[in-house]
Amino acid sequence: MEETAQRVEVRAPMSGIFYRSPEPDKPAYVEEGDVVKKKQILALLETMKVFQKVKSPTDGKILEIKAENETPLKDDDLMFVIEKSQT
Amino acid sequence: MFSKILIANRGEIALRVIRACKELGIKSVAVYSEADDTSLHLQLADEQKCIGPPISAKSYLNIEGIIKAAKETRAEAIHPGYGYLAESEEFAKACENQGFLFIGPTPQNLRLAGDKITAKKIIHDAGVPVIPSSPGGVGTVEEAARLSSEIGYPVMIKASGGGGGRGMRICEDEEILHEEFSVAKMEARAAFGNDEVYIEKCILEPRHIEFQMLADRSGNVVHLGERECTIQRRYQKLIEESPSPRLTTELRKVMGDAAITAAKAVKYFNAGTVEFLMDRDGNFYFMEINARIQVEHPVTELVTGIDLIKEQIRLSSSENLGYTFDDLNRKGWAIECRINAEDPDRNFLPSPGIIEEYHPPGGFGIRLDTHLYQGYELPIFYDSLVAKLISYDLTRDGAIRIMKRALEEFTIKPLKTTIPLYLKIMDDPSFQEGEFNTGFINRFVPDEDEDD
């Protein structure tokens, strides 16, 4: 079953600054390997002082975190790769 | 008078200050972040200094970097604009200690304006009505409930260190108060690093009416009339006008005197704003002092003929006021729309990017304060305010017609902006009649929950 697991990409809905944690000194929302639930917060994206929550589109496991903390992303840049749960 | 001023800001307000400097024969220094090297304020200023990376905390909020730029360019004074360091006591002190004049209020004014509970107490003691509230911070939900029943519901829980509407919760009754109290504290801590909250009476159908103040170093204080800033979304002002369609000459006199009393009570210096909330019966209550030049200052300039930035500079160089409200050559009506790069159809999501097609409006009765130009790329790092469109005419109806015509002309493609929203408002009968309160905007945009 693992071989056919579906990879889900989470991309930036618009350009913005990517933050992995709610505050600089706080732990990251998620790390690679973490199991996440649908709608769980993965990161924040700040565009023109407005913060958007980046939420998981699915139940699954974080395979890769592609974006670097506190860096600007362009619209549609890849942020996370998630392995969708098989349930 | 100074020979060189550094402007510690960006965007339209940096341009505004640079233009005033030029007219006064003062050299200007623009500071900028690495993301702003194509910004218009660099082109208009006499000198330019990069002060750090794109993120505001490391550039426009970088006190050390700005002071260093002032030293290197031998500026004599620093104008902070609005936002960023404009209300930072630490910055004002740093300027003073390093031998630069901070063009704005004193550090003591800034500290008090930031400490809303103390400011309210001083101003209340001076005889200005304030909104009934808890005497200070409220620690427990039991204390909150006791005070709220004394004040009378509905009440508002507010963050002591707050502003801009964050950390505020309306409670209709005690049950809701019990639910909201801990949430408000958490929100306050997250937003301001201080979880102290207080309780305040919630004013029904309120209007936000503020008075523009100027004060010199000798203690003379003048008000320049009011601004009606009732049309807001989530406590962010959208449309401002002067005068207010709500005020009678008598009410203006009483409120103006109260505003002067408030400014004198805190020994205010330079330009500032005294904000009042007015209920549906015309009772007014002091809310806070904004210790800075405000975004909406142009409407006052158009109806009084006073250039507020030049007055800030003049007063900072220790000149005296020399006039009162009755001396002003007041005339006409001015309306400002804050054009934001936000999509009103998608819950005001920001809309950065390159401006491919730009046609600013012009003609009789139009003032446009903006840093936009054709081909400019709006950075993702900064505020979404891209232009202030101000119309002026002898009557309010005339100003509305000019505004509508100018909004129709204004092209900023392909960005999404708040222009379509303002066009709808200009056509709205209650707006045209001047009948509105702070809930007005909800008729045009549902206050959607950001969580889906």
Image (spheres, coloured by chain):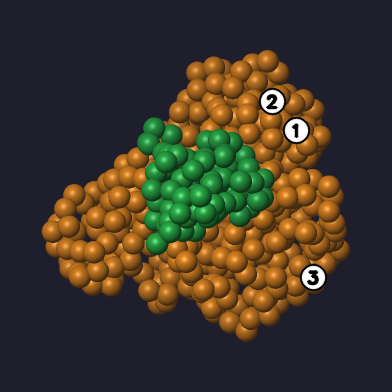
Q: Quadrant of residue B391?
A: bottom right
Give percent across and percent down for residue B22. Answer: 79, 35
Q: Chain of mark 2?
A: B
Query: Distance of mark 1 from mark 3, alpha carbons?
Result: 31 Å
Q: Are marks 2 and 3 on the same chain?
A: yes
B145 or B366, which lies in front? Answer: B145
Q: Tell me whether the residue at label 2 lies in contact with that at label 3, contact meaning CB atoms closer than 8 angstroms.
A: no
Q: Secondary structure at mark 2?
A: strand
Give percent across and percent down for residue B36. Answer: 71, 36
User: If you read the primary sequence from the N terminus, does the residue marked by circle 1 or circle 3 appear first?
Assistant: 1
The amino acid sitting under disc 3 is Glu
**Residue wearing tag 1:** B37
Give the letter of the green chain: A
B120 or B337, which lies in front? Answer: B337
Residue at (68%, 80%) from the top-left corner? B427
Q: Secondary structure at mark 3?
A: helix
**Residue wearing tag 2:** B50
Q: Is residue B351 left or right of residue B133?
A: right
